[in-house]
């Protein structure tokens, strides 16, 4: 019987959880993946919505294989699997909610999202460096003072012995 596969593309909300196989129970690997959502308003602008939250679960050899890789919070991932029963929870305000569950068959780094994030970070870093360099050039120019208005260390000597008046 064919099963529909679902794909979840997003970022790890936290470092994944792993439990090794024990007493006949298979190994278990769990990751929470969040995907940003936004909708276009009537005026053409976008409104950010709460992220779509999906818990991705792996069992047995797949869980052990995923545990061998170094997954970290914020990693861009693509998870594939079958939809499971949603899990209920209470949020910080005590309100009930539900999280989608994906019974995973595969998960990997999202190379496209990772590269785009690296490029955006490099661009932001270069922009910040350029702004800092510009501020360092502009600041001394703004701090320049008319030399005639600054008393020199010899001005009292000049005034006293030469009768110079400024």
Image (spheres, grey):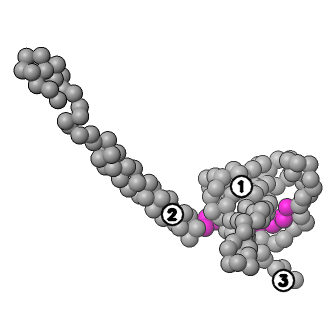
Q: Which residue is mark 1?
A: 13
Q: How many marks?
A: 3
The label nearer to you, 2 versus 1, is 2
Q: Which residue is mark 3?
A: 2
Tell me what residue is drawn at x 78 percent, y 77 percent.
5
Q: Is residue 34 left or right of residue 26?
A: left
Tell me what residue is drawn at x 76 percent, y 65 percent.
49
Could you tell me how far apart the alpha carbons at marks 2 and 1 are, in whole angstroms?
20 Å
Q: Between residue 118 and residue 50, name the one nearer to us.
A: 50
The label nearer to you, 1 versus 3, is 1
Figure quadrant of the C terminus: top left
Tell me what residue is drawn at x 51 percent, y 63 percent.
120
Q: Is residue 28 visible?
A: yes
- Residue 26 x %, y %: 82, 55
- Residue 117 x %, y %: 54, 63
**Disc ID at residue 120:** 2
Q: Earlier in the sequence, mark 2 or mark 3?
A: 3
Q: Secondary structure at mark 1?
A: loop
Q: Which stretch did the figure color magenta?
A: 99-110
């Amino acid at each position: 019987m064919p099963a529909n596969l679902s794909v979840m593309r997003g970022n790890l909300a936290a470092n994944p959880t792993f439990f090794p196989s024990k007493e006949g129970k298979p190994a278990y690997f769990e990751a929470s993946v969040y995907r940003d959502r936004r909708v276009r308003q009537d005026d053409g602008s976008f409104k950010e919505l709460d992220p779509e939250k999906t818990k991705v679960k792996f069992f047995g050899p797949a869980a052990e294989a995923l545990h061998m890789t170094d997954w970290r919070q914020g990693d861009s991932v693509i998870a594939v699997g079958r939809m499971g029963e949603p899990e209920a929870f209470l949020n910080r305000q005590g309100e009930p909610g539900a999280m989608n569950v994906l019974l995973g068959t595969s998960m990997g780094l999202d190379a496209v999202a990772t590269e785009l994030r690296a490029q955006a970070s490099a661009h932001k870093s270069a922009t910040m460096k350029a702004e800092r360099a510009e501020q360092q050039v502009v600041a001394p120019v703004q701090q320049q003072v008319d030399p005639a208005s600054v008393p020199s260390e010899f001005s009292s000597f000049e005034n006293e012995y030469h009768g110079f008046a400024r």
